[in-house]
Image (cartoon, rainbow, N blue to C red):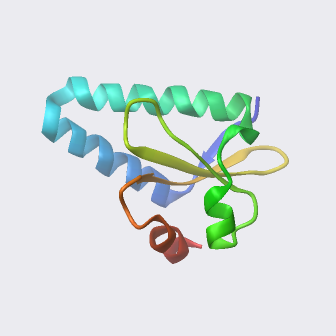
């Protein structure tokens, strides 16, 4: 299993999304979002190649992959390295993802 390392923008993305769910549905919805992220992260740590490389082609960022947390309209963007995986962003599927990732690349 590879450990995960979070870029600061990814941590900010999670904080903002969790706070939004907390405002919408209280602690239960915020907790469900957090649990879905943790479950998705476990999958990525055990099977890093499982994510889609669709955005890597669009953005010309070799090795960029994405994986959705179950039940929420988000994608976890990450790159698998030799020793770990680096979580780049956690973005809503409805956003202009190429623009958000390009600004960060």
**Image quarter of residue 72:** top left
Residue 43 lies, in percent from the top left, at: 63, 28
Quadrant showing the N terminus: top right
Quadrant showing the C terminus: bottom right
**Image quarter of residue 2:** top right
3 vs 94, nearest the viewer:
94
Residue 14 lies, in percent from the top left, at: 39, 46
Residue at the limit of the structure toward the right, as seen here: 82
Residue 6 lies, in percent from the top left, at: 57, 49
**Image quarter of residue 61:** bottom right
Q: Residue at x 45, y 69 (%)?
A: 100
Q: Is residue 64 left or right of residue 25?
A: right
Q: Height in image: 42 above or below 24?
A: above
Residue 20 lies, in percent from the top left, at: 22, 45
Q: Is residue 15 left or right of residue 39?
A: left
Q: How many marks?
A: 0
Q: Residue at x 50, y 29 (%)?
A: 38
Q: Residue at x 42, y 45 (%)?
A: 74
Q: Residue at x 49, y 47 (%)?
A: 75
Q: Is residue 82 left or right of residue 74?
A: right
């Amino acid at each position: 299993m590879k450990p995960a390392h979070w870029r600061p923008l990814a941590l900010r993305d999670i904080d903002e999304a969790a706070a939004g769910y907390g405002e919408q549905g209280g602690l239960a919805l915020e907790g469900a979002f957090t649990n879905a992220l943790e479950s998705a992260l476990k999958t990525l740590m055990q099977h890093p190649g499982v994510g889609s490389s669709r955005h890597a082609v669009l953005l010309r960022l070799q090795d960029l992959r994405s994986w959705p947390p179950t039940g929420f309209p988000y994608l976890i963007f990450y790159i698998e390295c030799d020793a770990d995986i680096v979580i780049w962003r956690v973005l809503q599927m409805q956003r202009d993802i190429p623009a958000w990732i390009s600004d960060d690349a």
